Amino acid sequence: MGDRRPRLVLLCGLPGAGKTTVAKRLERELSAVRLCPDEWLAELGFDLFDGEARDRIERSLWRHAQDLALAGAVVILENGFWQRSERDEVRLRARALGVEVELRFLDVPMAELERRIGLRNREPGSVVLTGELLRECRSLFEAPTPAELDLFDPPLS
């Protein structure tokens, strides 16, 4: 690990943007701990669309991520971070703890998201996401601006 500092890596993007694919690659490259709310929800038997369960899992993973970072780890959070206020809160809290924090925005065109979701929907055991639901997600998403991205630390790799 050398002189590497603790760090949080936030993956920001809509369903189908490639958050888990990127997170798994970074997990290997950075010897990081990957925390994926969707996987935890599924493992614990919750519906991925259960808002209350998701909120509880994400809060729990956030506490865990802080503990891991304070212990010196690089932690990848796959929450999606759809809202600016959520990204600001995590960034400010991480900085208050002395932890570096980077935001990786996976900006994928809607047509490509729909294509990827269509492929994923055909996988056995996948949670089907309709085009209508994807468009609803997009309407709720606040994409980070260049000025916001500048508030975060540069990527490690």
Image (tube, rainbow, N blue to C red):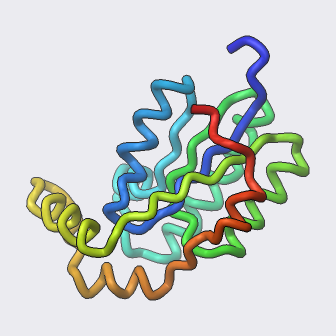
Tell me the quarter of the picture where residue 1 sits: top right
Closest to the observer, 44 or 19: 19
Q: 119 left or right of 53?
A: left
- The x, y position of residue 77, in whole percent, is 56, 49
Residue at the image point whose x is 41% and y is 68% from the top? 14
User: In the rendered view, would you say 90 is above or below 25?
Assistant: below
Residue at the image point whose x is 16% and y is 56% from the top? 125
Tell me the quarter of the picture where residue 32 sits: top right
- The x, y position of residue 21, in whole percent, is 36, 44
Q: How many labels does the image show?
A: 0
**The C terminus: image quadrant:** top right
- The x, y position of residue 130, in whole percent, is 21, 79
- The x, y position of residue 105, in whole percent, is 53, 58
Farthest top residue in view = 2
User: In the rendered view, would you say 2 is above or below 23?
Assistant: above
Residue at the image point whose x is 49% and y is 69% from the top? 53
Residue at the image point whose x is 37% and y is 87% from the top? 136
Closest to the observer, 60 or 8: 8
Q: 105 left or right of 14?
A: right
